[in-house]
């Protein structure tokens, strides 16, 4: 396997499973590994971007943090897809709800990811690229959520480069276009998956509502998103 380890990942070939769950926070990666996986071992500690490989219901799974923002997930997902031969990445993250009927802790599956980033510029496309989820993962996630009694919303999200917006004008404009929520990574993940011919899905839990000021404390963001995590883990098992 070429280029392993990388400057950002000390795992060697074979340390990373074909399916990777990626929360932004590396401590959330540790929580998922400690709570749900068996036979866990830490395979990366570079920059404290922790990665753990174990098994879930007998199937190999890696859980690794991806940091904050498109540049960060752009690096980690690119290396996983292209250097570690990962087939599937499922981002499990938090988002700010735009839609009025979304409540704190609701689960959203990002069918598509709008963005204000220039990440797609590198591909020299003669137009605008529409980053979308892998349909089979999306379909299975919806089925898994329904089987678990989880109310899942499917739709467009915004992957924004800006966390602290100067005004609410942009948020209101995206909301008018039916964008459900804002986060900071899905678009790059979907573009990297498309370019590598791999699969990706972004599952999100609403942690705050930027237009109303509601929000969860940091400790709950780290550990209380179990419904989303369990839906994601259901996708790591072979299809029936």
Image: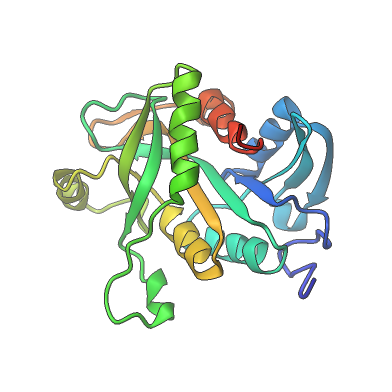
Q: Residue at x 60, y 46 (%)?
A: 22
Tell whether 31 sits left or right of 72.
right
Q: Position of residue 140 (x, y in %)?
A: 49, 36
Answer yes or no: is residue 71 visible: no
**Looking at this view, is 184 or 231 the one in front?**
231
Answer yes or no: is residue 112 visible: yes
Tell whether 124 sits left or right of 40.
left
Q: Position of residue 146 (x, y in %)?
A: 44, 22
* Among the 4 quarters of the image, the one containing residue 38: top right
Q: Residue at x 76, y 53 (%)?
A: 16
Q: Residue at x 60, y 31 (%)?
A: 234
Numbered marks: total: 0
Tell whether 42 sits left or right of 230.
right
Tell which residue pokes out farthest to the front in this image: 240
Tell which residue pokes out farthest to the top in this image: 149
The C terminus sits in image quarter: top right
* Among the 4 quarters of the image, the one containing residue 59: top right
Q: Position of residue 220 (x, y in %)?
A: 53, 25
Picture layout, residue 127 above or below residue 139? below
The N terminus sits in image quarter: bottom right
Q: Position of residue 112 (x, y in %)?
A: 34, 51
Q: In this figure, which colouring scheme has been used for the structure?
A: rainbow
């Amino acid at each position: 396997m070429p280029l392993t380890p990388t400057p950002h990942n000390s795992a060697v070939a074979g340390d990373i499973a074909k399916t990777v769950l990626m929360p932004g926070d590396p401590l959330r990666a540790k929580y998922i590994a400690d709570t749900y996986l068996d036979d866990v071992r830490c395979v990366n500690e570079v920059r404290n971007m922790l990665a753990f490989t174990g098994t879930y219901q007998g199937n190999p799974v890696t859980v690794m943090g991806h940091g904050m923002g498109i540049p960060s997930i752009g690096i980690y997902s690119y290396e996983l897809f292209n250097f570690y031969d990962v087939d599937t990445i499922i981002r499990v993250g938090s988002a700010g709800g735009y839609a009025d009927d979304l409540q704190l802790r609701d689960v959203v599956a990002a069918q598509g990811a709008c963005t204000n980033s220039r990440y797609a510029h590198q591909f020299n496309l003669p137009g605008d690229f529409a980053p979308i989820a892998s349909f089979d993962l999306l379909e299975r996630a919806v089925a898994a959520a329904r089987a678990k009694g989880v109310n899942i919303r499917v739709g467009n999200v915004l992957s924004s480069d800006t966390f602290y917006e100067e005004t609410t004008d942009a948020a209101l404009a995206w909301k008018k276009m039916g964008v459900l929520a804002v986060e900071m990574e899905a678009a790059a993940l979907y573009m990297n998956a498309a370019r590598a011919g791999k699969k990706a899905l972004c599952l999100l839990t609403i942690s705050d509502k930027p237009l109303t000021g509601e929000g969860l404390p940091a400790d709950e963001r780290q550990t209380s998103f179990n419904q989303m995590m369990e839906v994601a883990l259901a996708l790591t098992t072979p299809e029936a």
